[in-house]
Amino acid sequence: MKTNGCNQWRQAAQQLGRRFDCKALILMYHGVAAVGSDPWPFYVTPQHSAEHLEDLRRYTYPIQLQRLAQASGHVSLASRLVVVTFENGYANNLHTARALLERYDIPATVSLITEPLGHACEFWQDELDRLFLPPGTLPETLHLSLLGSPYQWALGEAAHYPDSASMQYRNWRTWEEPPSSRPALYVSLWQLLQPIEDARQKILDDLLRWAGATPGAHPTHRSLTLQEVLTLAQGKRIDVGSLTVTHARFSARPVRMQREEIQRSKAFLEDLLGHPVTSFCSPYGTYTAETVDLVHEAGCACAGSTSLGTVGRDIDRLQLPRVGVEDWDGDEFTNRLSMWFDA
C-alpha cells in the first residue's frame, strides 16, 4: 500500500469543499446480464444496456465520479452531467459492461465488496434467488435455526415450482406483494438473513444441502476475481471504488465496526491496485452521521447513497444521491432521463 500517496490525497481531499455547485445525475447499475429472475432488480440485459449508453452519449455529458467530485464552481447547471456507477463487483462488469462502455466512450465507477473478491462466488442475495425462484422441486418442509431461534416452513404445493409459475412471476419485485408461496418464502428468508452477516454463510450452506443444490456460482452472477479486478481497472475508462468488506448494514453497526469496514476495504483495494481509492458507497444506502465523518476521515473525496435525486447545489459530496437503473428499453430510459433532469 502506498501510504505516502494516500496521506497526500487525504490532505488534499480534506482541503476541498464538500458541496457541489453543479447539477448532475448519478446512475446506479449492478450487473449486465440476461437472467431468469431478478427480484431487486439488479440486472440490465446487454441489449438494453447498449441502448442506455447510446442515449447517454447522445443526450448527456458522461464524466467520471472523481471528476464530478472536483467540479464545484466549474460546471454549468445546464451541463446535464451523468456519472455511471456499478455496485457489488459482478464479473459481468468486466466481461460484458466494459466492452459496452468502451464502445460508447463512457467512463464508469465500479464499487467493490472486497470479501468475495478472489472466490468467484455468488453474492448471498443471488444464491438465495438461485435456490428458491427458478423452477424446480424442493423438500416439503424447511427447518432452520437462526441465532438460537427455531424456524419452520411447510412448503406444501410450493415445494414444486413449475416452469409456468417461474415465467409468470419473473418480473415480480421484492417491494410488491409476493404473488405465490415461493416468492413469499424468499422474502421471509431474505429478511432473516440480511442482518446476520457473521452467520449468513453457514445458513446458506445448510440451505444448499437441504435443497440438494450444487455449490458454485452461475456465470451471470459470480463475483470478480482479484486478477479480473486488475484487468477491469486497466486504462482510464473505469475507476474502482469501495463498498466495504462484507456489505454490512451500517445503520445497525457501531462506529468501531463501521470504521473497520471502511478502512479495511479501502486499504485492500489500494494495496491491490497500487493507487489511492477515493470513492465510497454505503451498503444498502444506510448510514449514520458518524458514517459520513468516518468516510471523510478515511480520505474519500465522495460517497454515494441510495437517496433518490439529482446532484445539485448544496449536496454533500459524501452523501450523493443516485438513481437506480432497471432493465428498461431505450425509449423508457430516454423518458426517465428527461424526467430526472427536468424535474
Image (spheres, helix red, strand yellow):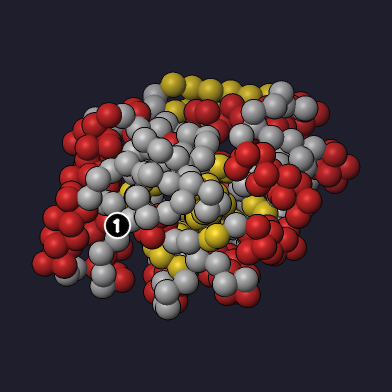
The amino acid sitting under disc 1 is Thr
Q: Is residue 196 visible?
A: no
Q: Which residue occupies the foreground of this view, 21 or 170? A: 21
Q: Residue furthest right?
A: 164
Q: Where is residue 273 drawn, in percent x and y?
A: 31, 71
Q: Which quadrant of the rendered structure holds the N terminus?
A: bottom left
Residue topped by disc 1:
278
- Which quarter shows the C terminus? top right
Q: Is residue 212 above or below residue 271?
A: above
- Residue at image position (62%, 47%) is 325
Drawn side of residue 82 relative to residue 201, left or right: right
User: Which image quadrant for residue 277?
Assistant: bottom left
Task: Give left or right: position of 341 versus 242.
Answer: right
Report the label total.
1
Q: Is residue 51 left or right of residue 233?
A: right
SS for dot 1: loop
Whole-percent x, y for residue 327 in the image = 71, 49
In the image, residue 293 lies at what x, y percent? Answer: 22, 37
Name the residue nearer the viewer: 240 or 106: 106
Mark 1 surroundings within 10 Å by alpha-carbon count, few (fewer than 14), some (14 through 19), many (20 or more): many
Q: Residue at x 46, y 51 (%)?
A: 76
Q: Which quadrant of the structure image shows residue 97?
A: bottom right
Q: Residue at x 60, y 57 (%)?
A: 60
* Residue for point 38% across, 44% down: 21
Residue 140 horizontal/vertical position (percent):
71, 31
| Residue 29 visible, this angle | yes
